[in-house]
Image (spheres, rainbow, N blue to C red):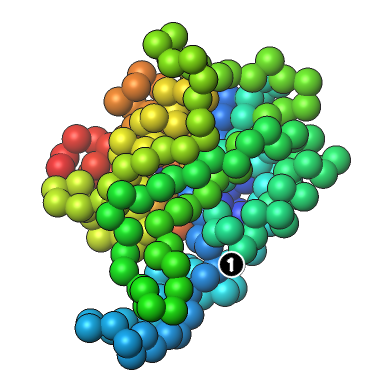
Amino acid sequence: MKLIKADAYVAIDELIENGIKVDHIITDPPYNISKENNFNTMKNPRAGVNFGTWDNGNFDLYSWIPKYARLIKKNGSMIIFCSYIYISYIIDVLNSLDSGMVVKDILVWQKSNPMPRNINRRYVQDMEFAIWAVKKGAKWTFNKPENKPYLRALFTTSTVSGLERLDHPTQKSLKLMEDIISIHTNLGDVILDPFMGTGTTGKAAINLGRDFIGIEKSSKYFKIASDRLSNKE
Protein backbone atom coordinates (compact mmCIF):
# COMPACT_ATOMS: atom_id res chain seq x y z
CA MET A 1 0.00 0.00 0.00
CA LYS A 2 1.25 3.47 -0.88
CA LEU A 3 -0.73 6.63 -0.07
CA ILE A 4 0.19 9.98 -1.61
CA LYS A 5 -1.15 13.31 -0.36
CA ALA A 6 -1.15 15.40 -3.51
CA ASP A 7 -3.21 16.85 -6.31
CA ALA A 8 -3.68 14.01 -8.81
CA TYR A 9 -2.94 16.43 -11.65
CA VAL A 10 0.47 17.17 -10.13
CA ALA A 11 1.30 13.68 -8.84
CA ILE A 12 0.99 12.11 -12.29
CA ASP A 13 4.21 13.71 -13.57
CA GLU A 14 6.25 12.15 -10.76
CA LEU A 15 4.59 8.77 -11.26
CA ILE A 16 5.45 8.81 -14.96
CA GLU A 17 9.00 10.00 -14.27
CA ASN A 18 9.51 7.17 -11.76
CA GLY A 19 8.24 4.57 -14.23
CA ILE A 20 5.31 3.49 -12.06
CA LYS A 21 3.07 0.90 -13.71
CA VAL A 22 -0.26 -0.40 -12.39
CA ASP A 23 -2.66 -3.11 -13.46
CA HIS A 24 -5.84 -1.10 -12.98
CA ILE A 25 -7.13 2.37 -12.22
CA ILE A 26 -10.45 2.35 -10.36
CA THR A 27 -11.62 5.75 -9.24
CA ASP A 28 -14.54 7.99 -8.33
CA PRO A 29 -13.58 11.57 -9.27
CA PRO A 30 -15.79 14.60 -8.54
CA TYR A 31 -18.89 14.67 -10.72
CA ASN A 32 -19.28 18.47 -11.17
CA ILE A 33 -23.00 18.21 -10.40
CA SER A 34 -23.36 20.27 -7.22
CA LYS A 35 -26.02 22.96 -7.58
CA GLU A 36 -28.67 24.90 -5.75
CA ASN A 37 -32.20 23.50 -5.55
CA ASN A 38 -35.35 24.14 -3.62
CA PHE A 39 -37.62 21.12 -3.40
CA ASN A 40 -40.61 22.90 -1.85
CA THR A 41 -42.99 20.01 -2.42
CA MET A 42 -40.99 17.65 -0.21
CA LYS A 43 -41.84 17.27 3.48
CA ASN A 44 -38.17 17.91 4.37
CA PRO A 45 -36.85 19.97 1.45
CA ARG A 46 -33.12 20.25 0.77
CA ALA A 47 -31.64 23.64 -0.06
CA GLY A 48 -29.49 22.04 -2.72
CA VAL A 49 -27.25 19.21 -3.75
CA ASN A 50 -23.79 20.15 -2.56
CA PHE A 51 -21.00 17.59 -2.50
CA GLY A 52 -18.29 20.03 -1.41
CA THR A 53 -15.96 22.57 -2.95
CA TRP A 54 -14.22 19.83 -5.01
CA ASP A 55 -17.50 19.30 -6.90
CA ASN A 56 -18.40 22.93 -7.60
CA GLY A 57 -18.01 22.86 -11.38
CA ASN A 58 -14.34 23.83 -11.50
CA PHE A 59 -12.94 20.30 -11.62
CA ASP A 60 -11.27 19.22 -14.86
CA LEU A 61 -13.17 16.06 -15.67
CA TYR A 62 -11.21 14.77 -18.64
CA SER A 63 -7.58 15.78 -19.15
CA TRP A 64 -6.26 13.51 -16.36
CA ILE A 65 -7.39 10.40 -18.22
CA PRO A 66 -4.78 10.17 -21.05
CA LYS A 67 -1.88 10.81 -18.66
CA TYR A 68 -2.99 8.21 -16.14
CA ALA A 69 -3.70 5.73 -18.94
CA ARG A 70 0.08 5.74 -19.61
CA LEU A 71 0.59 4.03 -16.23
CA ILE A 72 -1.61 1.03 -17.07
CA LYS A 73 0.07 -2.23 -18.08
CA LYS A 74 -0.72 -3.81 -21.45
CA ASN A 75 -3.50 -6.04 -20.12
CA GLY A 76 -4.87 -3.51 -17.64
CA SER A 77 -8.11 -1.60 -17.29
CA MET A 78 -9.66 1.60 -16.05
CA ILE A 79 -13.02 2.00 -14.29
CA ILE A 80 -14.27 5.57 -13.82
CA PHE A 81 -17.42 6.48 -11.90
CA CYS A 82 -19.31 9.44 -13.33
CA SER A 83 -22.65 11.18 -13.65
CA TYR A 84 -24.91 10.14 -16.52
CA ILE A 85 -24.47 13.70 -17.81
CA TYR A 86 -20.83 13.05 -18.74
CA ILE A 87 -20.83 9.40 -19.86
CA SER A 88 -20.45 10.12 -23.58
CA TYR A 89 -17.69 12.69 -23.05
CA ILE A 90 -15.60 10.37 -20.88
CA ILE A 91 -16.11 7.53 -23.38
CA ASP A 92 -14.78 9.78 -26.16
CA VAL A 93 -11.65 10.59 -24.12
CA LEU A 94 -11.04 6.94 -23.22
CA ASN A 95 -11.45 5.82 -26.83
CA SER A 96 -9.12 8.53 -28.13
CA LEU A 97 -5.66 7.83 -29.51
CA ASP A 98 -4.15 9.78 -26.60
CA SER A 99 -5.63 7.38 -24.05
CA GLY A 100 -5.10 4.15 -25.96
CA MET A 101 -8.11 2.53 -24.29
CA VAL A 102 -11.22 0.74 -25.56
CA VAL A 103 -14.50 1.10 -23.67
CA LYS A 104 -16.15 -2.27 -23.04
CA ASP A 105 -19.21 -1.60 -20.90
CA ILE A 106 -21.08 0.76 -18.61
CA LEU A 107 -21.44 -0.54 -15.07
CA VAL A 108 -24.51 0.47 -13.07
CA TRP A 109 -24.69 0.89 -9.31
CA GLN A 110 -28.32 0.57 -8.25
CA LYS A 111 -28.97 1.90 -4.75
CA SER A 112 -31.54 -0.10 -2.83
CA ASN A 113 -32.24 2.90 -0.54
CA PRO A 114 -31.77 6.00 -2.72
CA MET A 115 -31.90 9.57 -1.46
CA PRO A 116 -35.45 11.00 -1.87
CA ARG A 117 -36.13 13.88 -4.21
CA ASN A 118 -39.18 15.64 -5.59
CA ILE A 119 -41.01 12.36 -6.27
CA ASN A 120 -44.10 14.04 -7.76
CA ARG A 121 -42.03 15.76 -10.46
CA ARG A 122 -38.98 13.52 -11.08
CA TYR A 123 -37.90 9.90 -11.10
CA VAL A 124 -36.03 8.77 -8.01
CA GLN A 125 -32.33 8.91 -8.84
CA ASP A 126 -31.21 5.45 -7.71
CA MET A 127 -28.44 4.82 -10.26
CA GLU A 128 -24.81 5.80 -10.61
CA PHE A 129 -22.58 4.75 -13.48
CA ALA A 130 -19.00 3.66 -14.11
CA ILE A 131 -17.23 3.27 -17.44
CA TRP A 132 -15.07 0.18 -17.90
CA ALA A 133 -12.28 0.45 -20.47
CA VAL A 134 -9.26 -1.74 -21.26
CA LYS A 135 -5.96 -1.16 -23.03
CA LYS A 136 -6.13 -1.67 -26.79
CA GLY A 137 -5.23 -5.26 -27.57
CA ALA A 138 -5.47 -6.31 -23.91
CA LYS A 139 -6.22 -9.77 -22.63
CA TRP A 140 -8.38 -8.18 -19.99
CA THR A 141 -9.51 -9.63 -16.66
CA PHE A 142 -13.13 -10.72 -16.27
CA ASN A 143 -13.70 -13.15 -13.42
CA LYS A 144 -17.22 -14.44 -13.97
CA PRO A 145 -18.32 -16.67 -11.10
CA GLU A 146 -18.70 -20.26 -12.29
CA ASN A 147 -22.10 -20.59 -10.64
CA LYS A 148 -23.60 -17.85 -12.82
CA PRO A 149 -24.46 -18.41 -16.50
CA TYR A 150 -23.83 -14.72 -17.27
CA LEU A 151 -23.24 -11.43 -15.49
CA ARG A 152 -25.29 -8.28 -15.80
CA ALA A 153 -23.39 -5.01 -15.41
CA LEU A 154 -25.71 -4.18 -12.52
CA PHE A 155 -24.51 -3.97 -8.92
CA THR A 156 -27.24 -3.51 -6.31
CA THR A 157 -26.28 -2.46 -2.79
CA SER A 158 -27.53 -0.03 -0.19
CA THR A 159 -25.94 3.37 0.19
CA VAL A 160 -23.36 3.70 2.93
CA SER A 161 -24.71 3.95 6.48
CA GLY A 162 -23.95 3.02 10.09
CA LEU A 163 -20.36 2.34 11.12
CA GLU A 164 -19.24 2.22 7.49
CA ARG A 165 -20.31 5.81 6.95
CA LEU A 166 -17.44 8.30 7.06
CA ASP A 167 -17.42 12.05 6.59
CA HIS A 168 -17.60 12.12 2.79
CA PRO A 169 -20.74 13.13 0.86
CA THR A 170 -20.30 10.69 -2.04
CA GLN A 171 -18.75 7.67 -0.30
CA LYS A 172 -19.17 4.43 -2.25
CA SER A 173 -20.33 1.16 -0.72
CA LEU A 174 -17.52 -1.18 0.31
CA LYS A 175 -19.51 -4.16 -0.99
CA LEU A 176 -19.93 -2.44 -4.35
CA MET A 177 -16.20 -1.88 -4.68
CA GLU A 178 -15.37 -5.41 -3.54
CA ASP A 179 -17.77 -6.85 -6.12
CA ILE A 180 -16.24 -4.76 -8.92
CA ILE A 181 -12.65 -5.50 -7.89
CA SER A 182 -13.28 -9.23 -7.60
CA ILE A 183 -14.54 -9.34 -11.20
CA HIS A 184 -12.11 -6.96 -12.89
CA THR A 185 -8.81 -7.64 -11.08
CA ASN A 186 -6.73 -10.59 -9.90
CA LEU A 187 -4.97 -11.47 -6.67
CA GLY A 188 -1.77 -9.44 -6.34
CA ASP A 189 -2.72 -6.83 -8.94
CA VAL A 190 -1.84 -3.18 -8.31
CA ILE A 191 -4.86 -0.86 -8.22
CA LEU A 192 -4.45 2.92 -8.38
CA ASP A 193 -7.09 5.42 -7.27
CA PRO A 194 -6.07 9.01 -8.15
CA PHE A 195 -9.08 10.45 -6.28
CA MET A 196 -9.01 8.26 -3.18
CA GLY A 197 -11.39 10.18 -0.90
CA THR A 198 -11.88 8.17 2.28
CA GLY A 199 -10.22 5.10 0.80
CA THR A 200 -13.08 2.74 -0.03
CA THR A 201 -11.39 1.43 -3.18
CA GLY A 202 -8.21 0.87 -1.17
CA LYS A 203 -10.07 -0.92 1.61
CA ALA A 204 -11.76 -3.23 -0.88
CA ALA A 205 -8.46 -3.87 -2.68
CA ILE A 206 -6.61 -4.79 0.51
CA ASN A 207 -9.49 -6.97 1.72
CA LEU A 208 -9.22 -8.95 -1.52
CA GLY A 209 -5.43 -9.34 -1.58
CA ARG A 210 -4.64 -6.62 -4.11
CA ASP A 211 -1.97 -3.93 -3.76
CA PHE A 212 -3.10 -0.31 -3.66
CA ILE A 213 -1.82 3.16 -4.51
CA GLY A 214 -4.05 6.04 -3.45
CA ILE A 215 -3.78 9.76 -4.16
CA GLU A 216 -5.84 12.36 -2.30
CA LYS A 217 -5.58 16.15 -2.29
CA SER A 218 -7.73 16.92 0.77
CA SER A 219 -5.92 16.77 4.11
CA LYS A 220 -9.18 15.82 5.81
CA TYR A 221 -9.95 12.86 3.55
CA PHE A 222 -6.31 11.76 3.38
CA LYS A 223 -6.24 11.46 7.17
CA ILE A 224 -9.49 9.46 7.21
CA ALA A 225 -8.24 7.13 4.47
CA SER A 226 -4.83 6.69 6.09
CA ASP A 227 -6.36 5.71 9.43
CA ARG A 228 -8.90 3.44 7.77
CA LEU A 229 -6.36 1.60 5.63
CA SER A 230 -3.94 1.29 8.53
CA ASN A 231 -6.70 -0.42 10.58
CA LYS A 232 -6.74 2.39 13.10
CA GLU A 233 -10.50 2.59 12.87
Where residue 11 appears, as percent x and y from the top left, is: 57, 48
The residue that appears at 70% across and 37% down in the rendered structure is 103
- Which SS class for mark 1? loop
Q: What is the quadrant of residue 145 in the picture?
A: top left
Nearest the viewer among 111 and 232 is: 111
Q: Residue furthest top?
A: 146
Q: What is the quadrant of residue 79 in the picture?
A: top right
Considering only vertical position in the picture, is 227 above or below 63? above
Left of 126 or right of it: where is 90? right
Considering only vertical position in the picture, is 62 above or below 180? below
Where residue 172 appears, as percent x and y from the top left, is: 36, 48
The residue that appears at 58% across and 58% down in the rendered structure is 84
Left of 88 or right of it: where is 15? left
Nearest the viewer among 99 and 181 is: 181
Quadrant including the N terminus:
top left
Where residue 224 appears, as percent x and y from the top left, is: 27, 51
Mark 1: amino acid: Phe
Quadrant including the C terminus:
top left
Left of 164 or right of it: where is 68? right
Considering only vertical position in the picture, is 117 above or below 231? below
Nearest the viewer among 41 and 181 is: 41
